Image: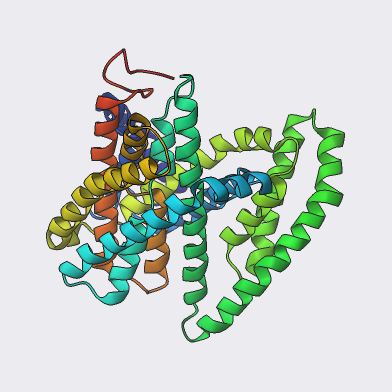
């Protein structure tokens, strides 16, 4: 019974609903709930779900849709505008936070490769946590939201590049050949997919845009088709999904497609975060909890401070700089994804992977608590601060 997919899905979503209720009462991110359910129901604790590999394979689809939707938000005009406005802040902060993660890991005796990967994971802030806690109906938050989203999108681009490099390195002795395929095959895919969008997809969307079911099917089919083509070319499914999203971003109904696919993405992302929790090695906690705590505290203190200084240098007012910095003061779901890919490729040690996972979870809890106590969010403790 416990080996069945239906029972696994029952445990995941029923458990997630129960723990998510507690998380919302505690004013915490739902990502914390999903990971916690994975730890509790996984092999390390209760063993209710005994085949986390099956869940990981299903969760992989969630990452494909996540990158597809990120691509949908990155139409060329927006990319150019973001590069002009926030490239400097993003690059400087990336260097500072990367060094922070490297130094913390090095001080606890991790290898150079582990330190580098911990540093990479430390550069990112959570798109999901930040946006879930950002009000959308308050006029004075529009500029704050634009700045935060600009930083997050550029960080996501850097994370995607890092993921692509990690995928290319997973070939062992064929790493250089994989890298060549990556940097040659990806541009070829872009050109081909732009042509397909212009001459095939766009006419179909225009002709049948009133049939929502067809739009949904065509968008999902395009995403998975490009993912499969990329895999067939020796690239990763994620590359194909991201290319599919970027090339579809110029479509007149791109925003509608994004809104339509978000529930599907969220379904699979619950699986992904559950799989991360189920795969977490609880036995390593006693070895890395001090390092994880130090990294988490350093992140939630230093990140907001650095962002405040950079925003002030960029000409933003003191209040906006402080709030934007606080909202960006955590690690990211992409931090978890980076170490998961690196672990699968055999690049990072289990202890370093556990360090990033635990530190990320701690920063989710601390950062969300700070934000809901001090700033307007949909789940703030005070009615005065609660905003949709």
Drawn side of residue 188 relative to residue 98, left or right: right
Number of numbered discs on residues: 0
Q: Is residue 244 above or below residue 228?
A: above
Residue in view at x 48 percent, y 58 percent: 158
* Screen quadrant of the C terminus: top left
Residue 249 location, quadrant = top right
Residue 344 location, quadrant = bottom left
Q: Is residue 114 above or below residue 131?
A: below
Q: Position of residue 43 (x, y in %)?
A: 27, 55
Residue 258 location, quadrant = top right
Q: Position of residue 371 (x, y in %)?
A: 29, 31
Q: Is residue 196 above or below residue 329?
A: below
Residue in view at x 33 percent, y 40 percent: 325
Q: Nearer the viewer, residue 132 or 140?
A: 140
Q: Nearer the viewer, residue 361 or 115?
A: 115
Residue in view at x 32 percent, y 45 percent: 309
Q: How is the image coloured?
A: rainbow
Residue in view at x 60 percent, y 61 percent: 239
Drawn side of residue 109 relative to residue 236, left or right: left
Res. 45 visible in picture: no
Q: Residue furthest top?
A: 383
Q: Position of residue 355 (x, y in %)?
A: 24, 59
Drawn side of residue 156 relative to residue 130, left or right: right
Q: Nearer the viewer, residue 142 or 297?
A: 142
Q: Position of residue 284 (x, y in %)?
A: 18, 62
Res. 163 visible in picture: yes
């Amino acid at each position: 019974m416990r080996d069945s997919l239906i029972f696994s899905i029952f445990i995941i979503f029923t458990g997630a609903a129960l723990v998510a209720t507690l998380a919302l009462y505690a004013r915490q991110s739902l990502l914390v709930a999903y990971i916690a359910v994975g730890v509790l129901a996984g092999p390390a604790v209760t063993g209710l779900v005994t085949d986390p590999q099956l869940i990981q394979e299903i969760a992989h689809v969630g990452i494909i849709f996540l990158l597809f939707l990120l691509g949908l938000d990155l139409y060329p005009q927006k990319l150019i505008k973001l590069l002009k406005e926030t490239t400097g802040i993003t690059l400087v902060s990336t260097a500072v936070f990367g060094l922070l993660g490297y130094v913390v890991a090095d001080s606890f005796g991790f290898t150079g490769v582990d330190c580098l990967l911990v540093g990479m994971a430390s550069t990112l802030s959570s798109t999901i946590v930040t946006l879930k806690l950002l009000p959308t109906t308050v006029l004075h938050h529009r500029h704050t939201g634009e700045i935060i989203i600009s930083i997050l999108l550029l960080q996501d681009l850097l994370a995607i590049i890092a993921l692509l490099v990690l995928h290319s390195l997973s070939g062992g002795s064929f790493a250089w050949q994989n890298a060549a395929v990556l940097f040659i095959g990806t541009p070829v895919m872009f050109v081909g997919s732009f042509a397909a969008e212009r001459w095939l997809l766009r006419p179909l969307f225009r002709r049948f845009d009133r049939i929502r079911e067809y739009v949904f099917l065509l968008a999902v089919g395009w995403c998975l088709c490009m993912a499969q083509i990329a895999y067939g070319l020796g690239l990763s499914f994620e590359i194909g999904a991201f290319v599919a999203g970027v090339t579809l971003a110029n479509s007149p109904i791109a925003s509608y497609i994004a809104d339509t696919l978000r529930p599907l993405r969220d379904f699979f992302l619950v699986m992904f975060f559950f799989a991360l929790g189920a795969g977490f090695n609880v036995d390593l906690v006693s070895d890395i909890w001090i390092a994880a705590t130090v990294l988490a505290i350093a992140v939630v203190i230093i990140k907001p401070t650095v962002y405040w200084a950079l925003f002030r240098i960029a000409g933003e007012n003191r209040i906006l700089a402080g709030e934007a910095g606080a909202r960006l003061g955590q690690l990211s779901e992409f931090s978890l994804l980076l170490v998961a890919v690196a672990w699968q490729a055999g690049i990072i040690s289990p202890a370093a992977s556990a360090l990033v996972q635990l530190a990320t979870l701690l920063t989710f809890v601390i950062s969300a608590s700070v934000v809901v106590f001090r700033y307007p969010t949909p789940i703030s403790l005070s009615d005065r601060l609660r905003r949709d």
